[in-house]
Amino acid sequence: MKNLKYLVAICVFAFSLNLNAQTFQLNSEVLQPVQVAMSIEKLEGYKVVKVVKDSAVKAVDEPTFAKVVNSDFKNGTIEVKVLSRLLKNAPEYSRGFIGLAFRISNDNSKYESIYLRPTNGRAQDQIRRNHSVQYYSYPDYKFDRLRKENPEAYESYADMDLNKWIKMKIIVNGTKARLYLNDNEQPSLIVNDLKLGPNASGAIGLFVDIGTEGFFRDLVISTQD
């Protein structure tokens, strides 16, 4: 048992040595809006990026994000703090959708995403609570297909709420991804079969969907060699 613990410690240490961390100062030079409106603002004393989905995009789980220019991510860790509010004209089914897209192709035609539905985290409906966290893969595996074909496999419950900062950390390795919220030791979502496969790579994006006024800060991307 001691030898096993020692081996695990060595593996974790070796993994950390191969990570190249980069903190991004989020501004208009670093970010490219893709089917969203984007602005740099102050919120609660923080310099943040505000992202709102283009109202002309009616479909859900589409490429609607602020894309980090020149980012190239295959494996590693993405950390960011997010806060979402509902727009005044948000439709009834809005949930404060906010999260991250990763491994975005150059033409935005393929990517993976994990996002949050903050209104569901404390809903007085257990089914809605079970849909607080979501994984999907664009273009072939949006949330509705995944929910129909594999109920519960790509969604989970996590405590969260609107208008509160939530720390997201996504660890990606090959076809596996883990989402950690607010420095919790255990993941809130485990995905063992990322749909784009182990060799996909690409940019990072700050994702929002319909009805959301999304805010982002403290983005750190650590890539694995």
Image: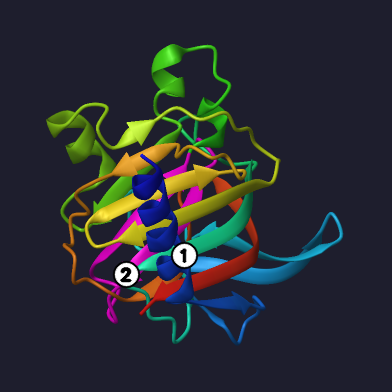
Q: Position of residue 142 (x, y in %)?
A: 24, 47
Q: Say what secondary structure mark 2 lies in.
A: strand
Q: Residue at x 48, y 37 (%)?
A: 186
The amino acid marked with disc number 2 is Arg
**Badge 2 local density, few (<14 within 10 Å), some, or many (20+)?**
many
Q: Say what secondary structure mark 1 lies in.
A: helix
Colour convention of the picture:
rainbow
Query: Mark 1 or 2 closer to N-term?
Result: 1
**Residue 205 — which label?**
none
Span of residues in magenta: 95-116
Q: Position of residue 181 (x, y in %)?
A: 55, 43
Quarter of the image that includes the N terminus: top left
Looking at this rendering, what residue extends furthest in the front direction? 2
Q: Is residue 119 left or right of residue 101?
A: right
Q: Is 103 inside the magenta-drawn segment?
A: yes
Which one is in front, 104 or 218? 218
Q: Position of residue 66 (x, y in %)?
A: 50, 70
Q: Residue at x 46, y 65 (%)?
A: 13
Q: Is 8 inside the magenta-drawn segment?
A: no
